[in-house]
Image: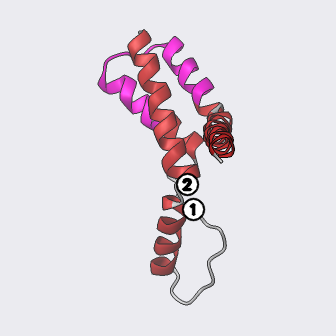
Amino acid sequence: KREIMLSILFIAIILVFCIDLSGAMDKANRWVWSKLYPGVKYTDWSIPLFGCSLCCTWWASLLYILVTGQLSFLMIAYIALIAFMTPVIKDCMILIKDMITKLIDIVYKYLD
């Protein structure tokens, strides 16, 4: 169970990166919008079910536990918790990046 739970956390981290942090989904949303509504100004629309990391984490993780045969109320509750925490996961990833950047700045100041 621990391996499955860790895998679900990794699924969330990957999806948060792809959807919330990389900018790839924004470009995909704009492209799909331009094909669906040519000539109409883009209005922050997102592809249904793929536009937010919470939704994607929920559905991808449910699919994962179904495929791996780990379906249980405990796993569904865990998936709900991890999906709900995707904004926090995003903030933690940004914090880690900012901390490393700050550390690099400190090293550069020390070397000067």
Q: State the residue position of label 1.
A: 46
Quarter-of-image position of residue 77: top right
Main secondary structure of the magenta stretch: helix
Q: Position of residue 44 (x, y in %)?
A: 65, 68
Q: State the residue position of label 2.
A: 51
In the rendered view, does 36 fall on the left or right side of 80? Answer: left
Q: Can residue 21 be seen in this snapshot? A: yes
Against 101, residue 69 (above or below) is above
In the rendered view, does 40 fall on the left or right side of 56? Answer: right
What residue sits 68% from the left and 40% below the top?
106
Q: Amino acid at mark 1?
A: Ser
State the quadrant of the N terminus: top left
Against 37, residue 93 (above or below) is above
* Magenta segment: 59-82
What residue sits 62% from the left and 36% below the top?
96
Q: Position of residue 10 (x, y in %)?
A: 45, 30
Q: Position of residue 42 (x, y in %)?
A: 62, 77
Q: Is residue 47 magenta?
A: no
Q: Amino acid at mark 2?
A: Gly
In this rendering, the count of numbered labels is 2
CB atoms of marks 2 and 1 within 8 Å:
yes
In whole angstroms, how far apart are the C-alphas of marks 2 and 1? 5 Å
How would you rate the neighbour count of disc 1 (Cα within 10 Å): few for under 14, some for 14-19, many for 20 or more? some
Q: Position of residue 6 (x, y in %)?
A: 45, 19
Q: Nearer the viewer, residue 70 or 28?
A: 28
